[in-house]
Every structure is written in C-alpha cells, then in structure tokens.
Amino acid sequence: MTITADASFEVLPFTRTCRHIWEDGDHVLIGVSPGNSYFSSERITRLAEWATTRFAQVDFVYADLHVDRMFAAFGYTQEHAEKRATKEIKAVRRRILKGVEESGPPQGEIRVRALSEFRDNPVYQLLHRRVLHFLETDDEFRKGCEKMALHFVGSKLPEGESITDGQLQVCFDYMAAELPFFVDTPSILDVPSSVAAYHVKMPLTDLLFARGGGLRATRNQAYAVVRPEAARTAGEHTPAGDTNHAPTERNVNERRAA
C-alpha cells in the first residue's frame, strides 16, 4: 500500500493497520544511525519539514548505544573504536539538530533524542528485557535477528568469512537497544499511536507484525518505509504487496479540523 503524497517522499505502510495509524497522524519516530550517509543534514531538513506537516508529534532518535562495540567487533582497536564512535555520534547529533533547525518553524512538536536517554524509562526497560528474553527463548525471533544482523553488517566481513559468535552478540545488543521502539513506542513516549519510519524495510518487520504469539508490535504501533520519491522513479525495488496507491494524505492541520 503505497502513499505518494507529494514529490518529496514515498510512504509504504507495512500493513493496512499501519496505514490507518499513519493516517491518524499522532506521532512518527524517525530512527537515525550514526555513520549512515543517507542521513545528511539536507535529508533531515526535508524529513522534518515533511513529517511535521503530517504528524502532531515527531521524534528523531539516534543510536548511541554499543556503537563503540560494533566498531571494535569489526576490526578497530578498542581505543580507535571508542574515538570513532564518539566522533560519529557527535556528528549525527549535529546533523539532526542542523537539519531540524533549517526546516523552519514546525507545524507539529518535534524533538531530538539519543537512544541512551531512554535507559531509565521503566517501559523501555521492560520492553528491552522482553527483547532479550525472546532472543534467548524464541528460535524464530533469534533467526530473524541473525538475518537482520547479516543484512546490515555482512558487507563488513572479509570475503569468504562468516560472522563470529562475538560479532553476532554485539549486533544483537545493538538491535535489542533499538527494538523496543518498533514494538511499543506509544507506551514509551505516552502517545496515542506511533509510526516507526525508516528508509528501507527491516528484515524483522514480517515477524514483528505477524499474527500469533511471540514478540509482536502492539496494535497502535505501525511501521512504514519512507524514502525519497526519486528512488522509486529511478527504479528502486518496491516491496512485494506494496502496489496499491492510497489517497493523498491530509496534513496535520486538516486532520485536526476534521
């Protein structure tokens, strides 16, 4: 189900329910990874301009946990890993703040937060423990996390080598810190509903939004791929099933008046 709202971004809600949550326009969370060239300050500016016209509240959350361990696990010395992580985290925060500032006065509330700011949040702590529990006890979930780890770090491995148990554990810890926001952001941030937005589909999305038992996203949690419209016109692959075009979105002020 594709929503093509304007010339800026294409939106692909993962399920029909995700689309309804998107249309509610309560809250969107945009996760930003350090060292990811996709998130330039110009891209952040466009995302901020675009998101605040469609959502009452917008949160940019950038990863700052286990970043040094990730660098160390994939070839950096501990000292170099710590310095590189500090540099990348500071750089991504600067880019987000600059991008948000240059987006102008927002129509909705907008915040910039580090992932580490939520470590004392009781709901986040509970969800984090649940993620770790399912990593230990649910083979399907663990395999999904392994697939996700290889998806994001496979290119860092020397040709012909497999990921080690130590590298995999660091990846699990990094992902486990982020996954609470893909499961139940509304409870963490006390918002009616929320859309987790990223520019590519996460390998775990199918599992988190499937029916049945196990670790699943709550009913008021949505996921959507949000990418530049130009990516589609340039021939970028559209995920299977995302072929129906939804009506043009209303902006946040139009929804409030409805």
Image (cartoon, grey):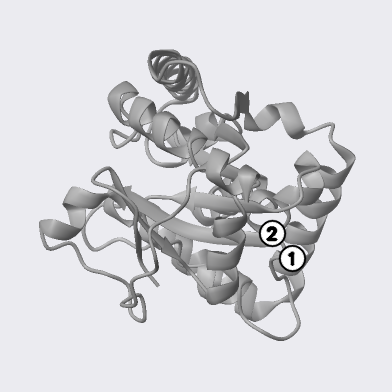
**Residue bearing the label numbered 1:** 218
Q: Secondary structure at mark 1?
A: loop
Q: Nearer the viewer, residue 242 or 166?
A: 242
- 211 to 42, vertically: above or below: below
Badge 2 vs badge 1, beta-carbon distance below 8 Å: yes
Disc 1 crowd rating (10 Å Cα; few below 14, some 14-19, many 20+) is: some
- 219 to 49, vertically: above or below: below
In the image, 109: left or right of 43? Answer: right
Image location of residue 193, percent across then percent down: 70, 53
Whether residue 5 is visible here, answered yes or no, is yes
Q: Nearer the viewer, residue 74 or 248?
A: 248
**Residue bearing the label numbered 2:** 183
Q: Secondary structure at mark 2?
A: helix
Q: Residue at x 52, y 32 (%)?
A: 67
Q: Nearer the viewer, residue 71 or 219?
A: 219
Q: Residue at x 45, y 36 (%)?
A: 33
